[in-house]
Image (cartoon, helix red, strand yellow):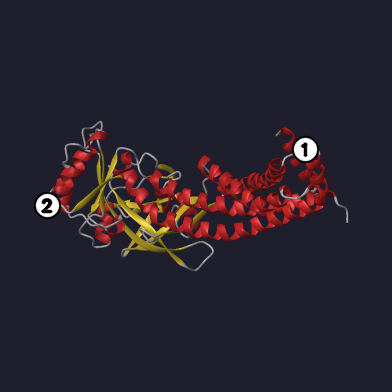
Amino acid sequence: MKLILLYSLRNLVNRKLTTILTASGMALVILVFSAVLMLSEGLRKTLVKTGTPGNVVVIRKSSGSEVQSGIEKDQARIIEVSPEISLNEEGKRMVSKELVVLIGLPKKGTDKLSNVVIRGIMESSLPLRSQVKLKEGRMIRWGSNEIIVGNKIADNFDGVRIGNTLNFGQRQWLVVGIFEGGTTGFSSEIWADVEQLKQAFRRPNYSSMIFKLSNAKDFDIVKDRLEKDPRLTVEVKREIEYYEDQSAMMAKFIKVLGVSMTVVFSIGAILGAMITMYSAVAQRKNEIGTLRALGFQKTTILTAFLVESLFLSLIGCVFGLFLSSFLQLYTISTMNWQTFSELAFSFTLTPKIILQSLLFSVIMGSLGGLIPALRASRQKIVDALRTD
């Protein structure tokens, strides 16, 4: 086997140009394939990390998202006295009633408006969102028309720096701070006092409620009680599961569309590898005859050419993954189909994506090299040694 590997490697080195061209074609396919998976994973990771373990989200039953949800004041009072809710150091319940609305803001470099989430929060919201840190300026004064904006909003939209005012809900809102939500979806939101936001948009109800459990094992108990309470029409989810559901539809669409495109590109790469290996078989006909005359079996010849094709695909895979790793430096923004708002996230390369790319390259190399390898192994010694 060692001899076969050395033979295959020597031939790849001797045919530098064809090796580079074929491996480059496969590298481009792997680049597209891994980029699609990285895009889907980046979206999923951003939304899932928005959730906090131990936090619970309550929305109206069958609403799907906070934007479509509504919880009445009387219902909120029932929910916020649940005994499973954790207490802070001051003995207050760690529960927040929030409102989510959408407004249009102009993106930098374009005249087009994009939807942005405005989240009405309470003072009790902050301890529930440990991922969020104030980056510049100060926190809003409760009861005022002040807002703080996520860093991704500040980077991608006009007129949202500290000291600027935004007009929405028939009011002027002063930007007093910029917060950082890490890799979470909060970085793509604007926060304001929930009661002021309700008045501005004439909303009598809240969109959702978030609370922290004193014991994470009590989730099934509180979920069962609240969802079966005849006074309530709510759906109770772990916050992590809620945001994972938010990413499911779009991540699936990206995967299906991207993998479909990759399959089309991979056909070209497989044909390129096949042509390269056919050419190698034709050029080394005498070598094949000599190897057969020296006693090498047909299976050994087949293995040699198949290994050569796999080497080509693996070289392309390594180069393609190397290129795709640089995509992690970029942040893109798109519409979240569940909330119809702008969401910024980054490409994310994971060990699972690396393994999937390696497997995909092995499949391409095997399909591209199998038929030429079979042809090489089936050549008769007399025909192979014949010189034209």
Q: Which mark is residue 295?
A: 1
- Looking at the picture, how far across and down is residue 45, in whole percent? 44, 46
Q: Is residue 85 left or right of residue 345?
A: left
Furthest-right residue in this view: 388
Q: How many marks?
A: 2
- Residue at (27, 35) in percent of width and height: 216
71 lies left or right of 6: left
Distance of label 2 from label 1 (alpha carbons): 85 Å
Q: Nearer the viewer, residue 61 or 296?
A: 296
Looking at the image, residue 299 lies above or below residue 36: above
Q: Position of residue 128 (x, y in %)?
A: 31, 40
Q: Is residue 26 visible?
A: yes
Task: Locate the C terminus and report the quarter of the image it occupies.
Answer: bottom right
Q: What is the crowding at mark 2: few (fewer than 14 residues within 10 Å), some, or many (at least 20)?
A: few
Q: Nearer the viewer, mark 2 or mark 1?
A: 1
Q: Secondary structure at mark 2?
A: loop
Instruction: Find residue 231 and name its label.
Output: 2
Q: Residue at x 30, y 58 (%)?
A: 67
Give the image quarter of residue 166: bottom left
Residue 326: tell me if it is visible. Answer: no
Of the image marks 2 and 1, the number of the one nearer the N terminus:
2
